[in-house]
Amino acid sequence: MTSQSICYASGDRTQFHFSATLKDLLEAAPPEQCILITDEHLAGIYGEILSDYRLISFPPGEENKSLPSLEILTEKLLGLRANRQTMLLGLGGGVVTDMVGYLAASYMRGVPFGFVPTTLLSQVDAAIGGKNGVNVGLHKNMLGVVKQPNHIFFSCEWLKSLPEQHWQAGFAEIIKYSYIADTRILSLLQQTTINRFRRQPDELETLIQDCVFIKNKIVLADEHESGIRRILNFGHSAGHALERLYALPHGHAVGLGMRVALRLSEIHTGLAAETSEQLLQLLEKYGLPTRLPHDEKAVIDLLLNDKKSRDKGIDYVLLEKPGVPVLKNLQAAQIREALPVLN
Ligand SMILES: NC(=O)c1ccc[n+]([C@@H]2O[C@H](COP(=O)([O-])OP(=O)(O)OC[C@H]3O[C@@H](n4cnc5c(N)ncnc54)[C@H](O)[C@@H]3O)[C@@H](O)[C@H]2O)c1
């Protein structure tokens, strides 16, 4: 295991542990001080090897990233007499890390917490940066906090049981980084495939660490998303609306959202049409959907309630060219113009 400590502007400090084994986890997060929180699916797969920990779980799925689930978990924590010294360890994908990050920030007004991200998407994105929250109705992450975890334990070992669909979803966020921040990753993705990364854990680990550092660099510059951090929302405005309306995996929705963002970029920032074509090919190559019949009005209505909306229009992340994102305030009618790209 290699560990690195990072201190954010808020003063929160996170220990990043890479190639962390179960033994490393047990040493850095001793079972007697921790309660492990996971979803019921992962409790079934990993409950036995994690049996040193007191474990509580909730049903998997985006629909359970909710206030009612938080209330049930809070009651379970009280039942286990969790106190202000207890560390909550969230083991799972982005649903678990979002729930546990939010719960830990509010349980008894804040307890220590750590993450063991078990999906590719949560390793490259959801576990990093401290933005954690829950959905309210159809609205994504409407209640949330910015609070950094004390520990994050990364290991490709967890990914061995990950279903194909969630490998694809993780690559959507990696494709996102490649367009907004690092065109070297874009070239790498063009040259290789999911299966190759699955067969080459060293290459996968390097890719994951590159993504962690890209996100961290941005979060270190703007922890509370008043400026540069907003570029991480590339593909997420339309993406979040599609995700909630059509119950898509987060990554699949972000892929579709990136298509909309690039179509808007062609119209408003003069992005070359070849870049949109290149994204289309990359999404296809990584098994992600490129089209989705949808109700334009419903998408726009949900978009207008997004956290990125302002009194006038929505601050949309567009691209001038790969590696050069820009924010542009767009009206609902302008966004609607780009939605047919998904038909
Ligand atoms: N906070 C952030 O910055 C941030 C960033 C990106 C996404 N997110 C959130 O993350 C969520 C999506 O997360 P996700 O894509 O990780 O999906 P997920 O958490 O819903 O997990 C997907 C499914 O995979 C299963 N699973 C997880 N790890 C597994 C493993 N190793 N083996 C077998 N099955 C496994 C889970 O039980 C679940 O059924 C969304 O709610 C999204 O909003 C948050």
Image (cartoon, rainbow, N blue to C red):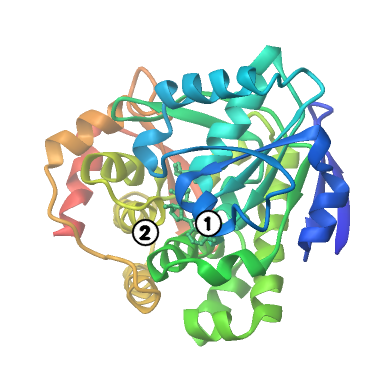
Q: Which residue is mark 2?
A: 255
- Mark 2 Cα shell of 10 Å, populated few (<14), some (14-19), many (≥20): many
In the rendered image, the vertical position of residue 140 relative to residue 84, given as above or below: below
Q: Amino acid at mark 1?
A: Leu
Instruction: Please count the marks in the image.
Output: 2
**Residue located at (18% from left, 46% from top):** 337
Q: Is 10 drawn above or below residue 109 in the view shown?
A: below
**Residue under the point 60% across and 59% down:** 181
Between label 2 and label 1, give the one nearer the viewer.
1
Q: Which residue carries the number 1 mark?
A: 121
Residue placed most toward the observer, 118 or 176: 118
Q: Is 254 situated left or right of 174 in this image?
A: left
**Cβ–Cβ below 8 Å for labels 2 and 1?**
no
Q: In the image, residue 237 lies at what x, y percent?
A: 37, 41
Is 126 situated left or right of 206 in this image? left
267 or 29, nearer to the observer: 29
Q: Position of residue 52 (x, y in %)?
A: 74, 47
Q: In the displayed structure, would residue 171 be above or below residue 333?
A: below
Question: Residue 95 in the image: x percent, y percent?
Answer: 48, 42
Q: Cβ(mark 1) to ligand 1 < 8 Å?
A: yes
Q: Earlier in the sequence, mark 2 or mark 1?
A: 1
Q: Residues within 10 Å of mark 1 (few under 14, many from 20)?
A: many
Measured in 3D between alpha carbons, the distance from the residue under mark 2 to the one under mark 1, in whole angstroms, is: 13 Å
Could you tell me which quadrant the N terminus lies in? bottom right
Q: Secondary structure at mark 1?
A: helix
Give the camera-side residue of 255 and 198.
Answer: 198
One can see residue 96 in this view? yes
Q: Is mark 2 within 8 Å of ligand 1?
A: no
The amino acid pointed to by label 2 is Gly
